[in-house]
Image (cartoon, rainbow, N blue to C red):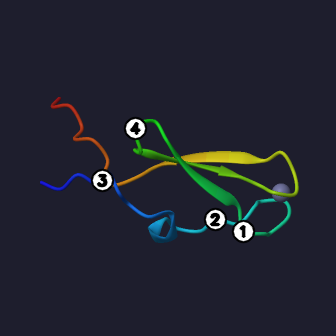
Amino acid sequence: MTTPLNQSLMELPDRLCTWCQVPMKKRLVGGQQFVHYTCPKCVFQHTTRLGPKPPSPAH
Ligand SMILES: [Zn+2]
């Protein structure tokens, strides 16, 4: 297993602001399991999870 503790921000996928269509600033949050995007031009924010999704519970 690998621990992406030193994952570079450059490796994170870019995301365009929904409204401005400009590249959003990226920041790792939540123990580096999430990427927090903020638009430099407006107040739009978006958070996405990194890596594979957690295994779904058996049902
Ligand atoms: Zn924006």
Q: Which residue does the numbered mark 2 point to in the structure image?
A: 15
The image quadrant of residue 33 is top left
* Alpha carbon separation for disc pair 4 and 1: 23 Å
Direction from residue 43 to residue 50 in the image, left or right:
left
Q: Establish if 29 lies above or below 38.
A: above
Circle 2 sits in a helix, a strand or a loop, which is it? loop
> Mark 2 or mark 1: which comes first in sequence?
2
Which residue shows up at 80% across the image and 69% down it? 21
Disc 4 secondary structure class = loop
Amino acid type of disc 2? Answer: Arg
Q: Which residue is mark 1?
A: 23
Q: In percent of the image, x 78 and y 69: which residue is there?
A: 22
Residues at marks 1 and 3, CA–CA distance in whole angstroms: 24 Å
Question: What residue is at 85 percent from the left and 64 percent from the top?
Answer: 20
Query: Label 4 belongs to which residue?
Result: 31
Which mark is first along the chain, 1 or 4?
1
Q: Is residue 35 above or below residue 17?
A: above
The answer to whether the residues at label 1 and label 3 have Cβ atoms under 8 Å apart is no
- Residue 58 image position (x, y, % from top left): 15, 31
Q: Which marked residue is nearer to the observer: mark 4 or mark 3?
A: 4
